[in-house]
Image (tube, coloured by chain):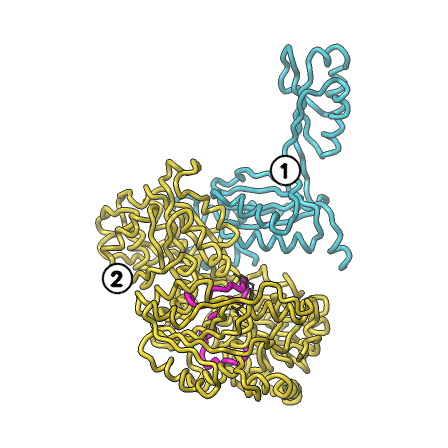
Chain colours: A cyan, B yellow
Amino acid sequence: METQDNEKQEYNITVYTENQIGLLNRIAIIFTRRKINIDSLNTSPSEIESIHRFNIVITESEEVVRKLTRQIEKQVEVLKVYYHTNADVIWQELALYKVSTDVIAEKVSVERLLRENGARVVVLRKDYTVFETTGHREETDNLISILQPYGLIEFVRSARVAIIKDSDGFNSKLREFERLEPGEDVVENEYLNKGQKVFTM
Amino acid sequence: MEIAQQEVLVPAAKAQAVKLSGSEALLEALIVEGVDTIFGYPGGAIMPIYDALYDYNDKLNHILVRHEQGGIHAGQGYARTSGKVGVVFATSGPGATNLVTGLADAQIDSTPLVCITGQVFAHLLGTDAFQETDVINITTPVTKWNYQVTDATEIPEVLAKAFYIAKSGRPGPVLIDITKNAQIQKFDFEGYVKCNHIRSYRPKPIVRPQYIQQAAELINQAKKPFIIWGQGVILGSAEQEFKAFVEKSGIPAAWTVLGAGAIPTDHPLNVGMLGMHGNYGPNVLTNECDVLIAIGMRFDDRVTGRLDKYAKQAKVVHLDIDPAEIDKNVKSTVPVWGDCKETLPLLTALVEEKQHTEWLAKFNDYTRQEVEQVIEKELNPTTDEMTMGEVIKQLNEITKGEAVIVTDVGQHQMVACRYAQFNNTRSNVTSGGLGTMGFALPAAIGAKFGAQHRTVVAIIGDGGFQMTCQELGTIMQSGVDVKIIILNNRFLGMVRQWQELFNERRYSFVDIQSPDFVALAAAYRIPGKVIDDRKDLPSALNQMLTNKGSFLLEVMVTKENNVFPMVPQGCSVSEIRLK
Ligand SMILES: Cc1ncc(C[n+]2csc(CCOP(=O)(O)OP(=O)(O)O)c2C)c(N)n1
């Protein structure tokens, strides 16, 4: 039990927050203060207006991740934090590759390359072509190594986004929040006594 | 912004909106929040607020400090004795950065503060304008929450949120940075609504009855249960509930530095102080108890010593309002999340009435050893030179344990915490978590404003006094009555003690010279006296305490004296040394 707790592996931390200036910094500080490197960080509006969702990936032991999670959840504007191993989430990264059209057209069977790598062309111009692929790190890495010999001009990869496999996600809770207290308007605090239903902690 | 409408307290304002400037709205907000005293220092970027304050002189008492660090420590002292939120004003740039030490101190000691800083005009933000600093980013790690206001209309809601966050749940410091344009801007002020709910903020975790049940079972089965309590009891105003729990369960209880006074020092079940310079019994017996009940304390490393050798034999019940504290340093067997004012009565109802006579006697045995080997020498020395301990002992006798004791940081702090008699809660004001030298003098000023009917005695080292001694000016100008005792050992004593014990007496830069403190006080029109003979001690203390207004008493104490017992750093609590 204890050894498992201390074994480092990738953890996907999901943070639901208010949309507030400065919050990214507050959350980042929780990691930097402990000298923990963030492998990947994505933040974007969630399915609920005014609530944002962060996906953070770090490689740490569960014990450390659990403590970090509580520190993040302690922030005033954070609604809820979850952490999951890779096995518990479905995750993807998006990658873009820019290659010289001439080279590609001449030397490679573009069609086969796309098919084999699950990629698609985003832009096709005289001077260059941009491919896109999504997948796990190894998959997007794979296409780099294939394109490298043909003069890869530019490459970029997004942060990871992850969906939690467990079907009882946060979504229904979020909707409940939103119903009881919509983002913009001030309402009477009828939800106050419902706190127990909404929050687990 | 999500604020529930509950209390609308500004008269007439709701009926028809009045035009107010951002500054006026701020001051209205402070009045509704029940603020009576503000500690602050003006400057260009906060001038509109100070200009508005000119007209609020009858409702808001502003204390002009001599340095913003003094201002924030005064705010902390005020909050600690009054239980209310301390309010501090400072200007942008250097004014704001001077608050950082106090913010860090308040953050780690969970002190509720609302600090208002002025900021350059919004259109100048990010341009390196005169006296512009990125106050929000600088203060983020040392505040519970902060916010920059760039538009006056935000002020009522933001202030309401600030006060709510500062004082609810686990309290802490909040900083609101207000750009100059927002201070000047006029807007339709529709009244001030106090905040009592924020969507994403849970000040208190939900109490889980099954954990209370489990905790009670553990406690009822325990042969050697031991309570350790911290400031959470005081912050939660749960002193009565705590006392009831201790007395019904009959369990010996020890305190962290910040928990001092929650039950009186001489309560029969109060077995003393925990930690590096705590008492012998509580430290050693931490490693012997079978159930450790931690209440409103956070297992600071100064309390636990080496974690891997801390209370390994014990089942741990941890009561805390902050879920992040539970299992952070010490793994709990039963976590009791919640406000201890709510959880303690539930627990008390389920615990059996008991007396742990034999177990309590063990604590008393250790006390006897400690008295023989340490306390007797410290409190009744046979040498010519005075000890810090005997000064505190004399002070106890004269004040009857009723005074508020404000300490700085160092040997005198540990001696004062160990030996001062605390008959009442909110009596020990000290910088526990950050250990900020220079804290005591300004904190004592604030402490007196927060508890005007009480005697406030500041006990300060010769080193720490020189860090914020300019606040004598604040005492002079405000006429506040604080009694100042400087325990002068002509050394940075605590550092010297470590050098003696752990660095082969290599006294590297701890020999500190002092000015004539009494003359310095006199320059600020504060009477004072210096003594170096034991026979003058009682009369000097009496003179100080009966003096109308502030008084500075400098006591020359033994140069090389050590605070014992001591758990050396990196050692287990049961390796505590008596010499
Ligand atoms: C701002 C700050 N700087 C440095 C320290 C480190 N420090 C802790 S105790 C101490 C010595 C304090 O000396 P003094 O004020 O004379 O008190 P004494 O220990 O002699 O009672 C020092 C330098 C500190 N706690 N705070």
Range drawn in magenta: B418-443
Splitting the image into 4 quarters, where does residue B565 fall? bottom right
Q: Quadrant of residue A158?
A: top right
Q: Are marks 2 and 1 on the same chain?
A: no
**In terms of depth relative to the viewer, which is nearer, B108 or B460?**
B460
A35 sits left or right of A141 in the view: left
Image coordinates for residue B450, horizontal then vertical, percent: 37, 69
Answer whether residue B441 is magenta in the image.
yes
Mark 2 surroundings within 10 Å by alpha-carbon count, few (fewer than 14), some (14 through 19), many (20 or more): some
B325 in magenta: no
Q: For ligand 1, tell me if the residue under mark 1 lies within 8 Å.
A: no
Q: Residue at x 76, y 52 (%)?
A: A7
Chain hosting mark 2 = B
**Ligand 1 located in image quadrant:** bottom right
Is B539 placed above or below B53 here?
Answer: below
**Pointer 1 residue:** A161
Q: Name the residue beneath numbered marker 2.
A: B59
Disc 2 residue lies near ligand 1 with CB under 8 A: no
Q: SS at mark 1?
A: strand
Q: Measured along the vertical axis of the image, is residue B21 above or below residue B385? A: above
Q: Nearer the viewer, residue B442 or B305?
A: B442
Name the residue at 53% across, 66% down. B512
Relative to B575, B556 lies left or right = left
Q: Amino acid at mark 1?
A: Val
The amino acid pointed to by label 2 is Lys
Which quadrant does the C terminus of chain A fall into?
bottom right
Q: Position of residue A50 (x, y in %)?
A: 47, 41
Q: Is residue B227 visible?
A: no
Residue B425, image quadrant: bottom left
